[in-house]
Amino acid sequence: MSEPLVTLHAVSKHYGRAIAVNNVSLDVFEGEFVTLLGPSGSGKTTTLMLIAGFETPTSGEIRIRGASVVARPPEKRDIGMVFQSYALFPHMSVFDNVAYPLRTRRVPSAEVAERVARVLDAVRMSGLAERYPRQLSGGQQQRVAVARALVYRPSLLLMDEPLGALDKKLREEMQSELKDLQRTLGVTTLYVTHDQQEALALSDRIAIMNVGDVVQIGSPLALYEHPATDFVAGFLGDVNTLDGVVAEAETGVVRVEIAEGIEVTVATSARRSAGKRVRLTLRPERLDLATTAGGVNCWRGRVRGATFRGELVRYDVELGSGLVVNVSRPYRGQETIFGPGQEVFVRSRPDDWRVFG
Amino acid sequence: MSARSTWRQAGLLVGPALLLLAAVYLYPLGRLFVLSVGGGPGGAGLEPYHRLAESSVYVDVLLRTTRISVVVTLVCLLAAYPVAYVMTRVGPAWFRVLMVFVLLPLWTSILVRTYAWMVLLQANGVLNNVLRWLRVIDEPLRLMYNETGVVIGMAQVLLPFAILPLYASLRSIDPRLARAAQSMGAGPWRRFYSLTLPLSMPGMATAALLVFVQGLGFFITPALLGGSRVITLAMVIETQVVDLLDWSLASAAAMVLLVLTAALVVGFDRLVGLDRVWA
């Protein structure tokens, strides 16, 4: 692979005795869309601020195009930044806001006008150039903020929860717009969010962060299918987490007892010896409900609750010994919904289970 | 709640203050106005105003008063801006220290502060002695009984009225705006004149209004530090009343001052909005 555009090497940031970012290493390649995903306090925003230059690392190295930028102030890093609050200048029109970085770079005014017009066109804000930020809706302000961060073609675009202030519908609209724009312009993007759906929808690669550490980096599909830890499995999408003891281990297959009389057959390449405590995860949509028994992992259960969510139905199903699992099934018509109290068989495939610990 | 009972409540809350104002302020003001148009030797009319306008002495006084106020306002804005800016940047402990230093003069009598300036500024005063001892000057500088002294004294007295609104205005600027500008390549100087300065304009306007309006009617400081060489409008009014007993001319001069001030306040309200004075 080519030389990365941004390299973080063993970067840490301490505030007194609190560790905000712990020994993070990360490469972002030209044209990539990488998302830092994690709960609040996981260090994702601090990591972004370290790259932007608003924070100085306690230790470690940050390179952009191979050159160390640790000693370089933010204004000399050639980055574009979109803040959650948009940070539009309230005393300037949309045009002047977007022209600001060009004027800072002493671009001749004819070229400023042309480039601002072009980028406003790209974010579908052409007709509103004379408006002031307070006269715009949240989505429009967001577009202006993006236009302003892109107009000078920075080598790196940093976005800190840029859609966090928008309502759900608008957020989904803006997601696809952002993705299109990023693909068309090919701008390398580092994106921070706590919204896993957003991360899955937008990213080429996701770096999952938790209490200052990068836990795992990979494509959305790879992280979803092969989470490195149960934290990743639980953070990216919904998951059933069950603790158990290995009852029997063969090559490629282990049997885990998760409750009195309930065993799961799990396909795994890792060796596990009998008697070991393990944690199992399984996505709710990988569990099937049926009225008849059959297959390797098939348990009798009783529906405790059913939640209609539109395109899918979520069930709480109680197995023996009070064990409850979440099951998610696509909605296929009213008559297919299992009602509370109904006896069902819960089935799963050995390949769909993940083993940790 | 009905509109009527709302009005009654408002009336009960504001009423006492309104009554007091009417008794000790509006009534004398009305009397002053009547005196200014009716009390002259020639009977009712605008005669006192004609006398004010025709005498080059009074016109000079009005111009000097305005000039001093303008200079004091500029000095105050220039001196207050950095202080207010620093106050938005320091931690809570330093902020408290700075705030005490800003407010302390307000709790000290103007008379005391003006006498202190006399001690500092007179020909044989502290400042001149220090400068001579340092061999910066040979002859004492004339720092008193001229406009320089008046401006120094008034600027110091009025400085808190510039610092406080400027601080409020600077503090209300979202610090993320500066970060955004910085990410777009703007250095400190550009960030200051493209963001901080224009966004603190309401604070500057408020500070200017408070200092200028108070400066127009200032009496003690110009009287003591300027003496008979720097006569301001307030001093003219005092002389007319106390020494010359010309109440109608004094009233007319007071009316001129009042109209000037009112015009400024109305103009400010149109341009910036009075509701922003303490916001």
Image (cartoon, coloured by chain):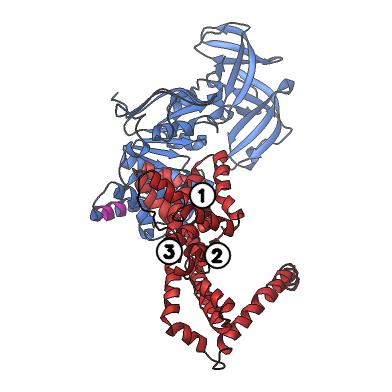
Chain colours: A blue, B red
Q: Nearer the viewer, residue B226 or A68?
A: B226
Asked which quadrant contains residue A279, the reply is top right
- Give the residue type that dot 1 points to: Arg
Quarter of the view holding residue A150: top left
Which kind of residue does numbered mark 2 sit on? Ile
Indicate the secondary structure of the residue bearing disc 1: helix
Relative to B61, residue A170 above or below: above
> Marks 3 and 1: which is nearer the front?
3
**Residue range (magenta):** A111-116
Depth order, front residue of A333/B42: B42
**Magenta stretch containing residue A274, yes or no?**
no
Distance between mark 2 and mark 1 Cα atoms:
33 Å
Residue shown at the point (49%, 85%) measured from the top left: B49
- Using the image, determine if residue A292 lies above or below residue B62: above
The vertical placement of A77 against B193, above or below, is: above
Q: Amino acid at mark 3?
A: Asn
Q: Earlier in the sequence, mark 3 or mark 1?
A: 3
Q: Where does label 1 land, which residue? A: B171
Residue hosting label 3: B146
Comparing B132 with B259, the one in front is B132
- Real-space Cα distance between discs 3 and 2? 15 Å
Badge 3 and badge 2 in a common chain: yes
Q: Which mark is residue B220?
A: 2
Q: Nearer the viewer, mark 2 or mark 1?
A: 2
Looking at the rendered structure, the secondary structure element under dot 2 is: helix
Q: Are marks 2 and 1 on the same chain?
A: yes
